[in-house]
Image (cartoon, helix red, strand yellow):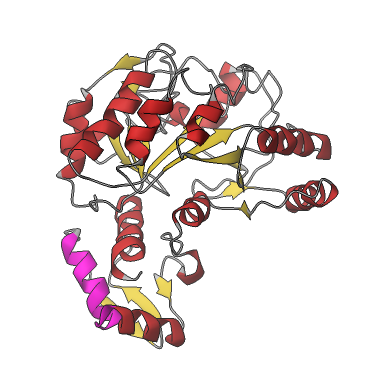
Amino acid sequence: MPIYEQIFGAFSQDSNNPLSRISQANSCISLDPFVGCSLSCAYCYRYNSKRDANVSTPRKLFADETLVKSLINNPYFIPSKTIIGIHTASTEAFSPEVADSTFNIMNLLVDKGYKNPFWLVIKSGIPKNSYKMFRYIVKRCKGIIISISYSDLPSSVEPFKNDRFKNIKEAIKAGVRISLHLRPVVVGWNDKYENIEKSILVGVKNGCQSICVGGLRFLKGIKYAITKKHKLRFPKIEENELKKTLSPKTINFINKVLKNYKINIPVFLHSSEMISNFLGISDYNLYKFRGNKKLFLRIPLREQAVIEKQKNKRTKKLIKEAIQELRLKNCKVEINCGNVTLSRILTYIEERGLIHKLGLEKFF
């Protein structure tokens, strides 16, 4: 059964609060005014939210304007820098019931002068005659990135089999960047070479400019949905809420396909790396600096010197500023030979928010 009342990473657990539909995700802040999705994918993360798990018809919970206002007033929002996801945690962004809201949210932000990049993960293609709408937004923000989720999963796992790339050329023509979201690749479901080959060739044929590959993350709600709702055997994956299990042979298969067909596009293991590549910025999730629960960051002294020269501030000062701006209480920072430690372990929302604050604004 789902163990969270709201979307994982929601800023509020109060269902009457708009912040319950704004969540801190690993690579973005997601706005989710709708509840309900008709695609019925067995592995969907919404099965881990009690509010979302059993709703199949999209229904609006909050006005787009309300969520945008709540986002702007949130200390975790960095104007013109935070990556904004839309409907990534709840529904299909371009389903007939939802598409107008997706465009409206982007328009509301750019019309207020915010240039934040947008990231959409989709399966249903985009609406016909979308070129002008995309073009208007692309000209006014730092970019729109669409990840098309396609990994040749069986119908028992992913019943939706319509054209994933419908009308996608309109978006490309308007300047939208397209990535193949080769996720999830799961042992026993779609991890054979033939699955990987088919997915990549279809994606490249339809204009995908990169590949972002990933496995399945263990969540109790997803396990319940797969085994009880969809009557499938649960795959062998690591029981870790924050880690996607991916077989090493998957990367070998991807490289083999690219070599055999002389395809020259980048491959990423993390969404933030793919997004950063398209935006032409350093990876804002700071994977190369990441430590563990006790060691927050490990910054080589050479990198630390570069950061301090560019920002004209000591690294410790930059981190203290970020902590203060996010209003993190009882959180002191120490640096010793590039090892950054905090006086307490952060919550998921705090940790992701601080990483993004440093990666998007303080360090680079």
Task: Determine the main secondary structure of the stretch shown in magenta.
Answer: helix
Please state the horizontal and vertical placement of residue 282, each as a whole percent of the image. 45, 64
**Image quadrant assignment for residue 163:** top right
In this view of the protein, which residue sits in the foreground, 218 or 25?
Answer: 25
Q: In this view, does 19 lie to the left or right of 116?
A: left
> Which residue lies at the image location 82% right of the left edge and 35% below the top edge?
194
Residue shown at 66%/51% (left/top)? 265
Classify the position of the C terminus by image quarter: bottom left
| Residue 227 drawn at (x, y percent) | 61, 24
Question: Total number of numbered labels?
Answer: 0
The answer to if 348 sits in the magenta stretch is no
Q: Is residue 122 above or below residue 364?
A: above
Q: Which of 338 and 176 is in front in this view?
A: 176
Where residue 271 sits: x, y (%)?
51, 49
Question: Which stretch is magenta?
Answer: 311-325
Instruction: Name which residue lies at 46% across and 61% down.
Output: 283
